[in-house]
Image (tube, rainbow, N blue to C red):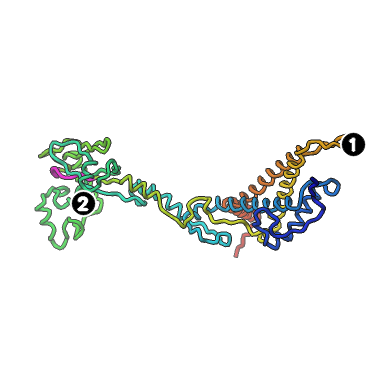
Amino acid sequence: MNIPIWPGSSSFHPGDTPFGFYDNDPAFEKDADKVANFCALRMGYPLVEIELQKRNFYAAFEEAVTIYGNELYAYKIRENYLTLEGAPTSIDIEESIVTPNMGRIIDYAEQYGAEAGTGGNVPWHKMAVPLTGSVQDYNLDKIAAQNGFTKENDIQIMRVFYEAAPASALIANSGFGFGLGGSVAAGIDGVGGMGGMGYGGGYLMMPLNYDMQIIQQIELNDMVRLSNYSFEMHNNVLRVFPVPGSGGNSGVSGSGVGNMWVEFMLKSERSSASIVEAYDKIKMVSGVPYKNPTYHDINSVGRSWIFEMTLAICKEMLGYVRGKYETIPIPNAEITLNQADLLSAAREEKEALLASLRGFFDETSREKLLERRTMESNFVMEELDRVPRVIYIG
C-alpha cells in the first residue's frame, strides 16, 4: 500500500489534532501550518523525503504546547501551593494573581501551639485528682472516665500541677518582715491612711524591692519547711510523693489532703483536628484547577520554545517510522536509514529543552527575584559609596 507522505505544504482544520485542545484558537490555527513547514525544512525537506503526514506535525505541535503549559503550571503550583491549599476549586486561576499569605503557615504552626499549651486547634481539658490519705498511685484513665471521658486510652497528660495561693496574697498574714503576727499586721492597715499589706487595696509605703524579698522569703519557707508534693507518671498512673496523709505530711504547703490537677488532650480530638473535610477546596497539587494554556496568550519566548520542542518530537516520530526498515534495497545497493541518529538527537534535544525551561522558571521564582533585587540594591549602595562626599563648611 502506497501511503502518502509530507507533500511540502498543508492546510490545518479544526479536528486535525488528537485532542483538539487548541483547534479553535486562531493563533494556533495560524501557526500550525507554519510549524509543520518549519519542522520539515529542519529535517531536510526537500532534499530528503519526510515520512510523516500533516497530522503528525499537528499532533507534535499540540503536544509541545501542552508540555509547555504543564511545566508552567507545575512551577506555579510549587511556588504558591501553601497559599492555594484550601482555596475554592471554582476560582479561575489562570486569570488570577496569587498573593502569598501566612494563613497555611499559621495553620501548620498550630500543632506546636497545641502541644505547648499556648493555643492551637486541639483543646486542653482539665480535671481534679482528689488526693486520698495513704494512697500514692492514681489511675488517671479511670478518673477521666469518671469525669465523662469514656473512650479507652484516649487521654494524653500534658501537665500536672498544684495551684497554691500566690505568695503576695500571704504577705499580710505571714508575720514576715516586721516580725509582726497577722493580727498586728492587720492592725497597721488603717494607720494614718498608710494602707495595709493586702492584694492591692493599699500598701505600706515601702520600697518595691522590700516586697519582692518578702515574697521570695515566703516561697522559700514553703519549699523548705512545708511538705510539697512531687510526682512520677507511668502509663497515665500518677504516683505522688510523699504519700498523702495527715498533719505535717498532709499536703502542699500544709493545705491538707486535697486535689492535684491535670491538664490533658484527647488523642481522638488531635486526630480529628488534623482532618478537615473540604469537598470544594483544593486538597492536593492535582486538584489545583489549572487548565490547558491559551495559546494566543503565550508570548514569543514561550512560542519559540514550543517550536523547538515540536521539532524534537517530530524527529522522534520520524525515527520510529524509519526504524521499521533499517535498510531499503535499491538496484545494486541498499540505503541505510538514520533511525538511531534521529532518536538520539530527539531525546537529547527534549531533555535540554525541558532543563532550560525549568531553569528559566526557577530563575524567575519569588525567591530568586528577591535575591536579585537585594543584590542590585547592594551593588547600587557600593557604587554610591565610591562617589566623593564633599564637606561643606558654612
Percent of width and height locating residue 346: 72, 43
Disc 2 residue crowd, few under 14, some 14–19, many 20+, Cα 10 Å: some
The image's mark for residue 347 is none
Who's the residue at 71% across and 57% down the image? 300
Describe the element under mark 2 as helix, strand or loop: helix
Please state which amino acid type lies under the numbered disc 2. Ser
Who's the residue at 59% across and 50% down the image? 368
Residue 8 appears in view: yes
Please state which amino acid type lies under the numbered disc 1. Pro
The image's mark for residue 168 is 2
Calculate the distance from the C-alpha at mark 2 to the C-alpha at mark 1. 114 Å
Task: In the displayed orientation, state which residue is furthest to the bottom.
Answer: 394
Q: What stretch is highlighted in magenta?
A: 254-261
Quarter of the picture containing the C terminus is: bottom right
The residue wearing badge 1 is: 331
Foreground of the two, 157 or 335? 335
N-term mark: 2 or 1: 2
Percent of width and height locating residue 158: 30, 44
